[in-house]
Amino acid sequence: MPKKDERLIIYEKMTQLIFYSKNLMIKFPKSERFDLCTDIKESLYKNLRNIIYAWKERNTLKRAEILNKIDVELYVLKTMTRLSYEYKYITPKNYMVWNEKISEIGKMVGGWLKACQKE
């Protein structure tokens, strides 16, 4: 029987978002794969990296700082998804699902940030 995974739920949600995003970006025109797609991927991986840093950080002030960076990067990511929709690279349904996944992670970050401020 496989060993139970001890990773954070937010980490799992982020990896699911990366998988979903990469599947959507396949539909983008070739000209955008080296521009908007690259920016989206960089943002996704930066967030994943920062989630791991926040998870490993023991100092609550530093953790809160990292979580704020994640929050800002999620806002940028939402803007890029809106651009993708406005340029008609994705359907309205794709846009709604993509934004919902990002918002869910944003809510988790907000809860984690509130927990840091209580400590």
Image (cartoon, helix red, strand yellow):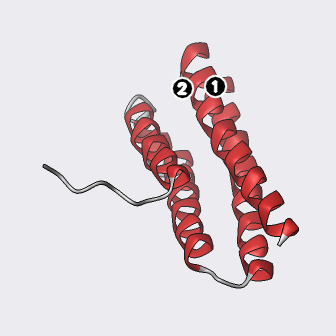
**Of 35 and 23, which appears nearest the observer?**
23
Badge 1 element: helix
Question: Where is the C terminus found, in terms of image quarters?
Answer: bottom right
Taking the spot 33% from the left edge, 56% from the top edge, the residue there is: 5
Taking the spot 70% from the left edge, 40% from the top edge, the residue there is: 78
Q: CA distance from mark 1 to mark 2?
A: 6 Å
Give the image location of residue 64, x and y in percent: 78, 71
Q: Is residue 52 left or right of residue 7?
A: right
Give the image location of residue 60, x and y in percent: 76, 78
The disc labelled 2 sits on which kind of residue? Tyr
Q: Residue 57 occupies which quadrant of the picture?
A: bottom right
Disc sitting over residue 89 in the figure: 2
Q: Is residue 70 left or right of residue 15?
A: right
Give the image location of residue 27, x and y in percent: 41, 28
The residue singled out by tag 1 in the image is 85
**Disc 1, disc 2: CB below 8 Å?**
yes
